[in-house]
Image (cartoon, grey):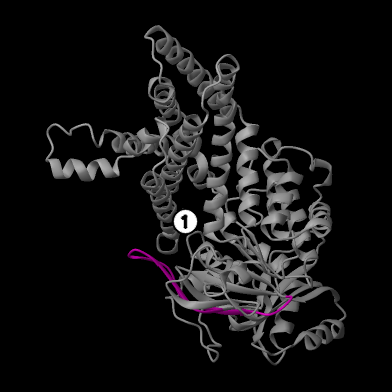
Amino acid sequence: MKFLVVCRRELRSYFSSYIAYILLAVFLLLSGYFFYSDLIFFILFGGYILPTGLWQYVFLDMRLCALLVLPLLTMRLFAEEKKLGTIELLWTYPVRDGEIVMGKFLACWIFFLTMLLPTAINPLIFYHFYQFAIGPLLAAYLGIFLLGTAFIACGVFISSLTENQVVSAMATYGILVFFWFLTWNEEVADERIVHVLLRLSLFDHFYNFSRGVIDTRDVAFFALFVSLFLFLTLESLGVRKWRGVR
Amino acid sequence: MIRAEHLTKRFGTFTAISDVSFEVERGEIVGFLGPNGAGKTTTMRILGGVFPPTAGRAVVAGYDVVKDSLRARSIVGYFPERVSLYLDLTVREYLRYVAQMKGLDGGQRRAEIDRALGSCALTHVAHRLIGTLSKGYRQRVGIAQALVGQPRVLILDEPTAGLDPEQVAEMRRLIRNLRGESTVILSTHILSEVEATCDRVIIINQGRILAVDTPRNLNQRLRQTSQIYLEVLGPTDAVARRLGAIPGVLSVEISPSPADGAAAFIVATAKDRDLRADLAACISEAQWGLQELRPVALSLEAIFLSLVNEPARPPSPEDNEVPGRLSA
């Protein structure tokens, strides 16, 4: 259960600095604004199917907020400990590398949940005026939750590669945006390649969720994506065994 | 308690340590002495479980630090050369975190934290953020985190580096107080530190061990002659002549006189031949006043220099006459 100890300390670090609050505020403000404008759009243009007319846009926009904020959350996880040198002590405690990775990952995850939960206020107010079917909304929340988890896993890995937080954040942006743009050249690419690219694209697996559809293939993709990056993180921590510690 | 067998660590093409072997008995305080870059930290990191050796084996309290890493680490308290702590925690919070990482539970944890705070004189700053503490205090927090959980083995990498003289003295006292409770291995490049705190010394240079012995034995081993310092109230030349005539005395050197008017001499005798009684008898026979008479110990400084300047070779047991440029 040592990963809980690691997790608690990470959360403590997040909330004892103002960075956490700023990230939280920016995420909530942006996603609140997007909800508002998407709702106006939906009403003005006379949409009547909520999942494809409203929720889809709300969650596609929320995805952008998560893309913006989560790399800034994960960038410090290992990079800061390496820079400060606190990681050396961490390695002398009787704790497995896996527990350290799990703890840090979990801390970000909990933080992400804290970010996500208050956004439910918007649809809740909406529900007060109009009793819509909540199934599709829950599916979309599951989607953004899985997508964010994937972002975090990727960020954790990148953070384990460097001791520079800016590099860590930037490289995470790079990878995530790449996984987004992967399908943008479908016009020029070979049909068979596009087919493969679509399968790999992070965001193409999110679109179904945002429209209220839960496809097990999409869930499996995210599970695989997360496991891959957590595995890579473990491997990258093992590098010290032959490369040493600065 | 600690056994290093032929440890070698390479980083790429760079060999940090090579064929390092030594043993530390239970309850001993052993100094790991060498210039900067000699391989002290690398050896300590291997013992602390930070990374495994490229070749060789290290065993702490019966547990292999690679194969049984978790169990070995749970026995070791480690103090890193670069003390870096989480600055956004208070001292007590930090120690609680450490205690949890070491797997202590509930009541035991509380008692351990209080004990560590007490023995490092940190109780009065327990509620302060580590980020607001001075270097000396942070260093003490570093020691305290190593002490939490009463580890049977303590690995301290340069525990006094960067402290002011008063803090150094305090740190040494703290380490000496650990005697009996824990087995301690501490690294330093300061010779007086080893003399002040350690039972045995391991001298390392350029990744190789040059000598392992007590400060006293090293002293003996490296000397070609024994020397005795004398202060006598009497005519300098006459005393020197008389002393030189004693059988067994190889040479008499006149030292700068101390302030009280006595004459001072350094008498060299054959190694392992104790002539102190003869010298005293001679002085009193001539009815001069004997102010002082003591064997001259070689400083570790001199021993160290002579070992380091030698071409590196593993010391062998029959290697008694290590030649050195020693004329203290």
Q: Nearer the viewer, residue B149 or B43?
A: B149
Q: Quadrant of the C terminus of chain B?
A: bottom right
Q: Nearer the viewer, residue A73 or A211?
A: A211
A18 to B182, vertically: above or below: above
- State how many labels appear: 1
**Relative image position of residue A196 (x, y in whole percent):** 22, 46
A204 to B164, vertically: above or below: above
Q: Nearer the viewer, residue A158 or B56?
A: A158
The reply to whether the magenta stretch includes residue B315 is no
A60 to B241, vertically: above or below: above
* Residue carrying label 1: A245
**Relative image position of residue A118 (x, y in whole percent):** 59, 26
Q: Nearer the viewer, residue A70 or A72?
A: A70
| Quadrant in the rendering for residue B111 | bottom right
What residue span does the magenta drawing correspond to? B4-27
**Relative image position of residue B257 (x, y in whole percent):** 73, 64
Amino acid at circle 1: Val
Q: Main secondary structure of the magenta part?
A: strand
